Image (spheres, coloured by chain):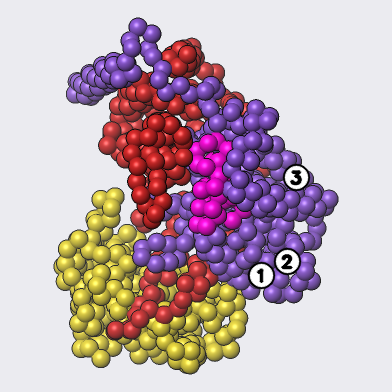
Chain colours: A red, B yellow, C purple
Amino acid sequence: MSGANSLTPFLAGSSLIHALDARVKVPLTLAFILTVSFLPFGVWPVYVLLLALTVSAALLSEIGLARFLRRSLLALPFALAALPLLFTIPGEALARFSLFGLTLTLSGPGLVRFASIAVKSWLSVQAAVLMAATTDLPEMLLALRALKLPRLLAAVIGLMWRYLFVLVDEAGRLLRAREARSGSREGAPRGGGLAWRARVAGGMAGSLLLRSLERSDRVYTAMLARGYDGEVRSLPHPPLSARAWGILAAGLLLLALILFLSRWMVA
Amino acid sequence: MHHSPVLIENLVFRYPDGHAALQGVTLSVAAGEKIALVGPNGAGKSTLLLQLNGILTPQSGRIEICGLEVNPKNLARVRALVGLVFQLPDDQLFSPTVYDDVAFGPIYQGLTREEIDRRVEAALDAVHMRDYLKRTSYHLSVGEKKRIAIATVLSMQPEVLVLDEPTAGLDPRARRSLIELLRELPQTAIIATHDLAMVRELLPRTVVMDGGRVIADGPTAQILADEALLEAHGLEALKC
Amino acid sequence: MLPVFAPVQMHIPDGFLSTLVSLVLWVVSAVFIFTALRQVNKTLGERQVPVMGVLAAAIFAGQMLNFAVTGGTSGHLLGAALATIVLGPWAAVLVMTAVVATQALIFQDGGVLALGANLFNMAVVGVFVSYAVYRLVTGLARGARWGVFLGSATAAWTSIFIASLAAALQLALSGTSPANIAVPAMAGIHALIGLGEALITLGAVAFLYAARRDLLNLASGEGKSSKSVLIGGGLIALALAVLSPLASANPDGLEWVAEQKNFLSAAREPLYAIIPDYVFPGISNEAVATIIAGVIGVVIVLGVTLGVAHLRRGRKAERGS
C-alpha cells in the first residue's frame, strides 16, 4: 500500500556512479572508510580534500546533493558520546564553564579531537550513503561475494532482503490494526500502562515471528520443488573489465596518496 | 443514535507515491443502514475504509462520524466509534489469547476491570464464541478467526462497523454462518466485498466504486440487475 | 522513510572507534560467524538458508513494532534475545549478523568499519548472554512456566545491558569517550532501554508460549556446543560486568594496563601520535594550508558539476534526436 520499497535508500539511476561495477564501488567505499579511519586528528586540509571527493562523487551520481547531505548527517547524534573529550583532554585552556558547581575547562586539543572525530565520522557516513544510494543489495552481495563473503551468508542475506518487504508490510498491517482499535471515550484518559503497551507490541512480534517460521517452511518446500538440494549455486560472475580495474586501481592509488599526504603533514 | 452516522463529502486522497486513490467521493449512510461497497481491485474501496477510521487522512474533503469530524484532534474518539475489521484476521489478532485480543480496545479506553470483562463476554456472545475466551487465536480456523476479529471491535461498542472482505477465503459453511452473524448485528455497517451473492442476500443498498470515484449508488436489486454497469466495472452479474 | 528503522541506539557509526579496535573486533566477530555457519549447517542442513533468511527478515521487520513511551518517544525491539530463545544461539548469531550487517550497509545504521564491533556487541555478546541467562533461569525453574517468562525477560534485559557495556568499553578503549563517563552513561540509558526490550520480548514469548510452546524449549536436542556457548555467554557477561565498573572507577588503571603492553597508544592514535601544530612544508600556517585545500576542493567540485551538466545535456540531445 504505502510501498515498502520507499524504505530502501537505493535510488535507481543511470549515472556514471550507478553504472560502475559494484565490485569497484564496494571495495573503494571500504577503502575510503578505512583511509578516513587511518587519518590523524586535526589534518583539516586533508579532510577538506576528502569532502571534495565525496561531494564530487555525489554530484556524479545525480542523487541530489540536498538529500545526500541530509542522509549523511544521520550519525550526528552519536557525536554526543565524544563530547566529554572537549573537557577531558589536557591542554591549553580556551574557555571555562561552571556547571552545577563543576568547573569545566574547554581545551584546544580537546576541541581538535572532538571536531576531528565528528568530521571523520561524517566523511565515512557520506561514503556509505553514496554506496547504498547507487548500489542495489543484490549487486552489493555480488561484490561482497567477490570479497570472500561466505556463500551461505550471502544466500541468507539475499533471502532476507527478498522477504523483508513482505514482512515490513505485514508488520505495518499489524500496527495499523492496533491503531484502528486505539480509540478513547470522550474526556476519558487513555488506559493500559506502559508495560501493557510494550507487551502488546511483543505479542505482535511473536505473531510475526511465528508466521514467518511457517512461511519459511513454505519457502523451503517451494525451493525443494524447484530442485534445491541445500547447495547454493550462483552464476559465475563476468570478469571485471579493464576499465573497471583501472578505476579501482586509480581510486586505491588516490586514497594511498591522501594517506601519505596526511602522514607527511604530521611528520 | 445519530441520524446519519457516516457523512463523506468530496473526499480526495493521493498516496505519497502520487497514486490518486480517491477522486472526490461523496457518500452518506443512515443510522442502522447496511451498505455494500463493490468494485474491482484498486477501485479505492480499502483506501476509503481506512479514511473512516482516520488511519489515512484526505488531502481535501471531509468525513463526519456521528457528527464528529475526522481530524487529528478527534482521532481517538472516532476510533472508538468506528470498528474496523481488516481482511486478514491474523493482522488483527496479535495477543496470546482470545481474551487479550478482544480486551485490547476496552483496556485502551481505560475502562474498569469489571467493565472490560463484561464487554469481552458480550462481544464474544454476539459472535457466538463465548467458549473461546481462553483459547489461543492462533490455532483457530479462518472462519473462527474472522468472528474473533469482529468481536475485537464489538467490544469497543462502536456505532459503525466497517468490514473489508469479510467472506474472502471462507469455505461455504463458514461463509454461511458469517453472513448469519452479520445479519444479527444491529450496527450501521459498511462492507467492502466481491461477494455479490452475499450483497444481494444481506445488504439493501450498494455503492459501486471504480477509479477512486462512486459510479453508482442505489438499491441493491436495481444495481445488481444492471448487467452493463457491472460488466463495465469488472464485476460479474449473478446468474440466477 | 527512516524512522521505521530506528531501533535501539547501540549501533556505533564509523569514526568513533579507532582503527585497531575496529579491525580486532572484525576478526573476532568473523571467527564467531564462521563457527555459527558450521554449527547451523550441522543442525539445520539444507533448511538453513530459507529458515535463517525469512527469520532474519522477521526480526528486522519486528524492529518496527514500537510502543509509545512518553512525549513522542517510543520503545523498540532489538531482538537478539527473542531470536536466541526461538532459534538457539548459533542460528541467532547468523540471523542477527544478517540484520546488523544490512542495517550498516544499506541503512547506514551503524558504520561499515565499525560493523565488526557492532556485530560483536549485538550478534555475539547479545546472543550468548541471552542464551546463558535464559538457560540459567529456565534451568532453575525446572521447566515451570514462570521460568520461561522470567528467563526471557531477564535474558532480554541482560543482553541489552551487557552489550551496551561492551560498546562503552570499545569507545573508551578508542579514546573517544572516557571510561568513567561512557560506562555509566551507556549503562544508565540501556538499563532503561533494556526494560522495553524485556517487556516486548516477554510479550512475544507469551504469544509463542500460547501458540507453539515447543519452540521455546531450548534445552532439548542440542549437543556439546551448547554447553560451551552457555559457559562462554556466562563468562562474557561476567567479564563485562566486572571489567566496566573497574575501568569506569579507575580509568587511569585501564590506561596503565594498556600502556604496559603498548596497546592503548596504538589503539588510541590512528597509526601515529597526533601533533596538532603540524606544518605544510613551505607553508608555515595551518590555516593557509586549509584554505589552499579548500580552493583545490572547490575547483574539483566545480569541474565535476560542469562535467555532469555537460553529460546531461549530451544525453538530452541524444534523446531529442
Discs 1 and 2 carry the same chain letter: yes
- List the residue tagged with mark 1: C150
Question: Which amino acid lies under the numbered mark 3 shown in the image of this protein?
Answer: Gln
Secondary structure of residue under mark 3: helix
Query: What's the distance in space between the residues labelled 3 and 2, CA to CA?
Result: 24 Å
Label 3: which residue?
Answer: C39
Mark 1 near mark 2, Cβ–Cβ under 8 Å?
yes
Are dots 3 and 1 on a single chain?
yes
Task: Determine if residue C191 is in view.
Answer: yes
Residue C312 against residue A5 in the figure, above or below: above
Regarding mark 2 in the picture, which secondary structure is present there?
A: helix
Label 3 vs 2, first from the N-terminus: 3
What chain letter is assigned to the residue under label 1?
C
How far apart in space, not on screen, are marks 3 and 1 (Cα)?
A: 28 Å
* Residue B225: percent from left, percent from top: 27, 75
Residue B29 is one of the magenta-drawn residues: no
Please rate how many residues cluster around mark 3, counting C-alpha atoms within 10 Å: few if below 14, some from 14 to 19, many from 20.
some
- Kind of residue at disc 2: Val
